[in-house]
Image (cartoon, rainbow, N blue to C red):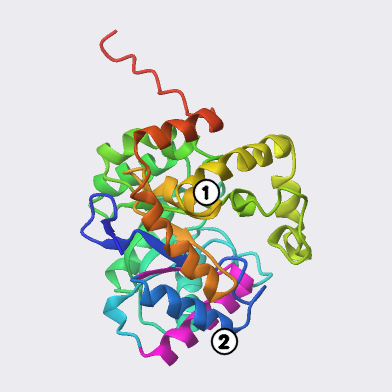
Amino acid sequence: MEYRFMGLSGLRLSALSFGSWVTFGDQIDENVAADCMKEAYDAGVNFFDNAEAYSAGESERMMGNIIKKMGWKRSDLVLSTKIFWGGGDGPNDRGLSRKHIIEGTNAALERMQTDYVDLLFCHRPDLYTPVEETVWAMNLLIQQGKALYWGTSEWSAELIREAYEFARREHLIPPVVEQPQYNMLTRDRVEKEYERLYGDIGLGTTIWSPLASGILTGKYNEGVPEGSRLDLEQYQWLRDRIMGPGWDEKVDKARKLEPIAKDLGGTLAQLSIAWCLMNPDVSTVITGASKPEQVKENMKALEIAEKLDDDVMLRIEEILDNEPEPEQDWRGM
């Protein structure tokens, strides 16, 4: 396993990590989840990602139970959770107010059976809470030892910078990591919007959906298979979003990429994960699986990454044809 620093922080994450979104509590039970986590752990994965919203907290409970049963040393693990969508129906059970951040984190720690998480994410921006309030609350939790680092997920570069600069100005702990979607079909935010943040504030990234919700596995090339993620009733919203405009073009690109994967001795999924690893601003690629065999196959992406030379990357780019245009820098003009 390769280990990478999370941006300019001193924390090292396994280049491939394991997340529980969709699978834990929705597709698989605790026994299968335990087998998946053990397969990842044995492969050298140290970062395990979760969120209060995943299966209404059941995902956190399952992960906590598994870690306790496995008897893994806590300091060997990097655990995360994300706060925004709480499980209750009350007016303060969601968002990034001081109240929900603190209460939501305490509840998550109880479910995960741990005293702290290494990474605490603001799962989405909150349009109704001042960013100053959110920064103060995250700073408090770190001071209390309930989190070691904090970051954001799917925040704009402008809002991340605002939070960072406020924290620095007030001598508080700033956000140091973002969890954005990033894959061959979704590139602009990571490669363009955040570009200056990597150098300016040392932002790290724990990217999700490297397989574009399954499109980049090739399993949707002939339609939506029964039992797949996009076939689940509770993820109809995801199907509606993904299978909108541009669906046919995305599937066509997946078909054209498959021969490249085959030439390298791997699968399209392994190629897609490996491609994400080639971006030096990616701290870790969060993978998911519904069976341990999938975890084992995903880990082989590290071997494919070693074969992605300039010629192969150019072949991929010619198929994708979606490299973001660099931002104009008008300083000095």
> Cβ–Cβ below 8 Å for labels 2 and 1?
no
The amino acid type, in three-letter code, at marker 1 is Lys
Nearer to me, 146 or 212: 212
Please report the bounds of the magenta region as a residue range. 45-71
Picture residue at 54% right of the left edge, 33% below the top = 320
**Disc ID at residue 31:** 2
Q: Main secondary structure of the magenta part?
A: helix
Picture residue at 35% right of the left edge, 68% below the top = 141
Asked if residue 331 is positioned above or below residue 68 in the image, the reply reads: above
Nearer to me, 219 or 41: 219
Answer with the quarter of the image where residue 244 lies: top right
So how many labels did they put on this image? 2
Give the label, 2 or 1, closer to the camera.
Answer: 1
Quarter of the image with the C terminus is: top left
Task: Return the x and y of residue 308 as percentages of the image width and height.
Answer: 38, 43
**Disc ID at residue 170:** none
Asked if residue 316 is positioned above or below residue 62 in the image, the reply reads: above
Quarter of the image with the N terminus is: bottom left
Task: Return the x and y of residue 321 as percentages of the image width and height.
Answer: 54, 27
Picture residue at 64% right of the left edge, 42% below the top = 255
Task: Return the x and y of residue 240 as percentages of the image width and height.
Answer: 76, 48
Asked if residue 258 is positioned above or below residue 236 in the image, the reply reads: above
The residue positioned farthest toward the top in the image shown: 333
Residue 307 lies within the magenta run:
no
Residue 69 lies within the magenta run:
yes
